[in-house]
Image: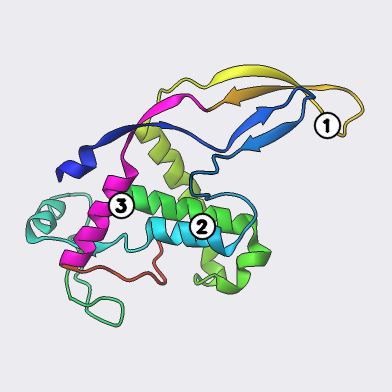
Amino acid sequence: MPAPLWDFEKKRFTNAIRDDPNGNLYSWINPDELQYAGLPSPKIDANWNDLISGRYFRLEDSEVSLLNQDPELPTLTKMPSNERISKEGFYGGPDVLHSLHCLNSIRKHLDMEYYAGSMTLPHEYRRIHIDHCVDHLRQALLCHGDLTPVTMKPVAANTSLPNPVTFYLGQTEREHTCRSMEAIRNWVTARGQRMGRIEPHLVVP
């Protein structure tokens, strides 16, 4: 694997839930970072598109040979050239971008009224796709097993309920050691430019 994928960085997670002195819970969002959650908007959609577009690129012969050695799967299928694939060949991409695609799909399903008109997957396949995405993300999280501590804080939350409610708030802002997503994204983009890629549209699992 090329060296840029081995770059690591220290990262504090943003969009944490905090409490104020009056017991009100709120989202803390770093204004200097791109936003990927919240009420749907063209800006959030553009951020997601920039993050995951072009995630499948043309594989080199050595990669195809290695992947075809998996005894549990059939050999790779060659993709013909068309309006979205400039060069015939075998295509693939890193799982992190597929997992992000899954998360984005779940995000869109939370606001189906907003996104219904732009859904490219036929209605009869949407549930199977979302179920796949939920379970894929479960397995991805278990695979990577981030052990950064999430510390707990009791909060007497201000709510509309008649009696006080104590929440146990997970503090998620500890510093994590992460692979550099910028390095991964740059590598994927360069691979696509050099070898060819599948242009975004109707790409599902």
Q: Quadrant of residue 202?
A: bottom left
Q: Position of residue 56 (x, y in %)?
A: 28, 62
Looking at the rendered structure, the kind of residue marked 1 is Thr
Residue in the image at 88% along x and 31% along y: 161
- Which quarter of the figure is the N terminus placed in? top left
Residue sitting nearer the eye, 78 or 159: 159
Q: Disc 3 vs disc 2: Cβ atoms closer than 8 Å?
A: no
The nearer-to-camera label among 2 and 1 is 1
What residue would you read off at disc 3?
Answer: 185
**How far apart are the two marked residues, 2 and 1, measured between alpha carbons?**
31 Å
For disc 2, the marked residue is 105
Tag 2: residue type? Ser
Amino acid beneath label 3: Arg
Question: Toward which corner of the image does residue 141 lie, by quadrant?
Answer: top left
Dominant SS in magenta: helix
* Residue furthest to the front: 32
Query: Is residue 90 found inside the magenta-colored segment of the image?
Result: no
In this picture, residue 143 sits left or right of residue 113: left
Image point (21%, 66%), residue name: 193
Looking at the picture, the colour scheme in use is rainbow
Is 86 positioned to the left or the right of 179 in the image? left
Q: Is residue 200 above or below residue 102?
A: below
Mark with earlier residue (1, 3): 1
Quadrant position of residue 58? bottom left
Chain-order first, disc 2 or disc 1: 2
The outermost residue toward the right is 162
Q: CA distance from mark 3 to mark 2?
A: 19 Å
Element type at mark 3: helix
Res. 92 in view: no
The residue where tag 1 is placed is: 159
82 to the left or right of 119: left
Q: Which residue appears at 56% of the width and 64% of the height? A: 42
